Amino acid sequence: MKFVTFSTPQTPPQPGLVKENRVHPLPYADMRAVIIAGADEAARHASKASFPFAEVRLHSPLRPTTLRDGYAFETHVKTANANRGREVPAEWYKFPIFYFTNPNNIFGPEDEIPYPPYTKEMDYELEVAAVIGKPGMDIKAEDAPKHIFGYTIFNDWSARDIQREEMKVGLGPAKGKDFASAFGPYIVTAEELADKSAGRPGVYELEMRARVNGVERSRGNFKDMYWSFGDIIARASECVTLLPGDVIGSGTVGTGCLLELTKAQGPWLNHGDVVELEIERLGVLKNTVGGDKK
């Protein structure tokens, strides 16, 4: 199933179920309520009335309750560390790493992303995110898929010059990341992806691409995660209860950002650039960079 948050000229943002290029409204306050109800139960309550998909505006499919972002693709990790003149820390291979970022500055498809005045090095990051649907603590990696409501595209927008300074202190990133996170266009449930399973918990064989102003810059595959979503969820849930609506990002796929592609030298994103992230089966997340580059 595919779930969206949408609006029309006559209606405010509301959750919906996508079927055959039409959006069927759901009688829930927001996407978190849909997630708590469960995909099958929510779908049973979908309105028979519907809107043509082309006539609705899509928003971020949800507002995360918490937002963790992983660091799970080895190719990206190796390149990022090489750009800093060092090897991958041995600890990276011991357990999956993640950090907490801002669950409030959330953007959706077609939204303009602000260019923060404090940075000169804005970047995109091509990621996939898992949306937690069933609460749990101390979840085993093999059981993690039972706790995932679905998957969506995640653009973890970054201010690289600020991030670089923060990381020298040994804490962060913070202001290098907290100004914008974009999700969408859908949350896609696991049965839509079953034939693409990569044989590890929460990992699928899906092509991932990024384009800037129509030119492909990044290409990778979801299956290349070194740490699976099962691994990340097992780590994140140790002595901690994950809740419906929590979101966990994969980290950047190999080649999935300008930092990696340009060896941290740029050129970086500019005002007016159009960034499209595409993941097979999950759709296309398109945004325009706004604001004035200082």
Image (cartoon, helix red, strand yellow):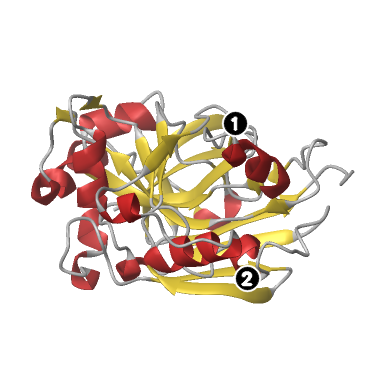
Q: Quadrant of the C terminus?
A: top right
Task: Classify 10 Å Cα crowding around label 1: few (below 14), some (14-19), many (20 and above).
Answer: few
Q: Disc number at residue 105? A: 1
Question: Residue 181 appears at what percent x and percent y?
Answer: 56, 41
Q: Is residue 20 left or right of residue 238?
A: right
Distance CA(mark 1)–CA(mark 2): 26 Å
Q: Is residue 37 left or right of residue 53?
A: left
Q: Which circle's residue, 1 or 2, is located before the other in the chain?
A: 1
Q: Disc number at residue 261? A: 2
Question: Residue 157 appears at what percent x and percent y?
Answer: 61, 47
Residue 27, located in which quarter of the rendered image? Answer: top left
Q: Amino acid at mark 1?
A: Asn
Q: Nearer the viewer, mark 1 or mark 2?
A: 2
| Helix, strand or loop at mark 1 | loop
Image point (25%, 64%), residue name: 193
Q: How many marks?
A: 2
Q: Nearer the viewer, residue 171 or 230?
A: 171
Image point (17%, 63%), residue name: 200
Q: Is residue 149 left or right of residue 268?
A: left
Question: Residue 63 appears at what percent x and percent y?
Answer: 47, 31
Do we see residue 253 in this rendering?
A: no
User: Taking 233 as reference, is 71 above or below it?
Assistant: below
Q: Disc number at residue 66? A: none
Do we see residue 290 in this rendering?
A: yes
Image point (53%, 32%), residue name: 13
Q: Amino acid at mark 2?
A: Leu
Q: Is residue 127 left or right of residue 169?
A: left
Question: Residue 60 appears at what percent x and percent y?
Answer: 52, 41
